[in-house]
Image (cartoon, rainbow, N blue to C red):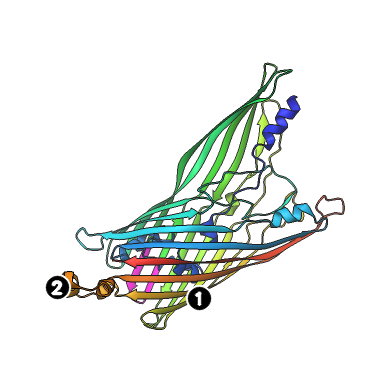
Amino acid sequence: MRLALLALLGILLLAPLARADNLEEFGYGARAQGMGGAYTALASDSTATYYNPAGLVYSRPLTLSFGFSLADYYLEFDSQRGGRLDDRAERIPDLSALSLGISTTIPIDKPDRLGIGLALFLPTRGLINLKARASTTDPEWFRYGNRHDRIHILAGLGLKATEWLSFGLGTQVFVDASGGTTLSAGLNAPVNPEFRLKLEPDAGVVASVLFSPADWISFGITYRSEISFKLDFPAAAVVQGINIPLQLEVITFFTPHQVQAGLIVVPTDSLLISLDLGWFNWSAYKDPFLVTSSNVAQVIPRQVVDFDDVISPKLGVEFVVTDWLTLRGGYAYRTSAVPDQTNEPTNLAGSAKHTFTLGVGLTFGTPPDQRSQEAKEGPDREAQTFLELLDEFSFDLDLFFQYHLHEGASATRPATDPIGSWDAEGGIVNFGFTFTSRF
């Protein structure tokens, strides 16, 4: 009976790890996503809450945005043994999400001295999924797992210090969890479980600076703090009056310390070039797996994987064809955080990734900075037709498409290994839109 209860407690949280930060993986906002995510020195609306809060000072009018995105996974895992475990590693459900944003400026001594923004990333299947697993030899794709839904709430504030220098401060709010469980049973009595779980907010810090010495060039740098949700889950089994305390520990979500530097250059009125370089401190991600321990022994042993820091350069290009049509493209490269698995007890599939992006921007109406004062305050304003009123607003529809290509990963194992040697590769398709209105 005692062993059965211990096994049951160990299985309570036995499910794939949730490791991926969807914004880090795919970017945020259709314009940025169409430019390979090279947006640190360019963001100026609600997307600046993620890329660079200092850019909010350039969100002069009130800006509202709504978007949708869908990511579909085509990842393969082929082991020497094959079968059910390979199929489970490849079975990654698509990710669909809504995004909402608002940004504006607050006039103090200058109309754009302060900028504020709020953004939401809302997975359509649910706001949060807390799942974790013990370390096993089962194959899995490191960044994706089986469930990756998580709400993101981003808020930011930008302050213009001079005409060419601004500072930003923001936060990313997530949901963490704590709780516990107790199982009790007598000699001839059924098992009686009791379960407690409480969701609590947690947040990370975003700090940034934006340097814009001229209209044709800007430089930005953004720091995002590490967020690590470690679920400490006390559990206990009471068997025939004997108390057996257990402690379940697992990292259910992790996003590392990271620094992004960006540069934009506008060589002509029609062409914009954006460059980003990011560093991600994945080597700080230690002991991510579910561990079950008691006052007697460690039921599931700890398994430490030495992950590698990640470097990611990005390039984005934007070309204005007409007043209402803009074309975009981009490329991003990311090194792998997963160490070589040949001599590791785990089978984590992870490799360097190439991301190719395309985007289209459509603009309707009159941008706020081009509207005449007469149009805003004219005496016959009430007599304007509906179409004339629409012309006083600016509507942008931005579309994007991304293809994420993973280089091949492999591990050579001895013939006695339960999985055997394996290879993994594949891609991800991500596409969507953002509708933005400026008043």
Name the residue type under label 2. Answer: Asp
Specify the quadrant that holds the C terminus. bottom left
Cα gap from disc 1 to disc 2, whole angstroms = 44 Å
Disc 2 packing (10 Å; few <14; some 14–19; many ≥20): few
Task: Say which residue appears at 54% left-offset and 54% top-offset.
Answer: 21
For the question of whether residue 27 can be seen, the reply is no
Residue at the image position 17 percent from the left and 69 percent from the top: 382
Q: Quadrant of the N terminus?
A: top right
List the residue tagged with mark 1: 329
**Residue 147 visible here:** yes
User: Mark number for residue 380?
Assistant: 2
Mark 1 and mark 2 in contact? Answer it, CB < 8 Å.
Answer: no
Out of 376 and 204, give the one closest to the viewer: 376
The local secondary structure at tag 1 comes to strand
Q: Is residue 331 above or below residue 150?
A: below
- What x and y, as percent, mark residue 402? 55, 69
Q: Secondary structure at mark 2?
A: loop
User: Could you say which is closer to the camera, residue 150 or residue 251?
Assistant: 150
Give me the disc on residue 425. none
Residue 377 coordinates in the image, percent (x, y):
15, 70
Answer whether residue 358 is magenta in the image: no
Residue drawn where x is 61% and y is 40% of the image:
250
Tell me if 248 is positioned left or right of 43 in this view. right
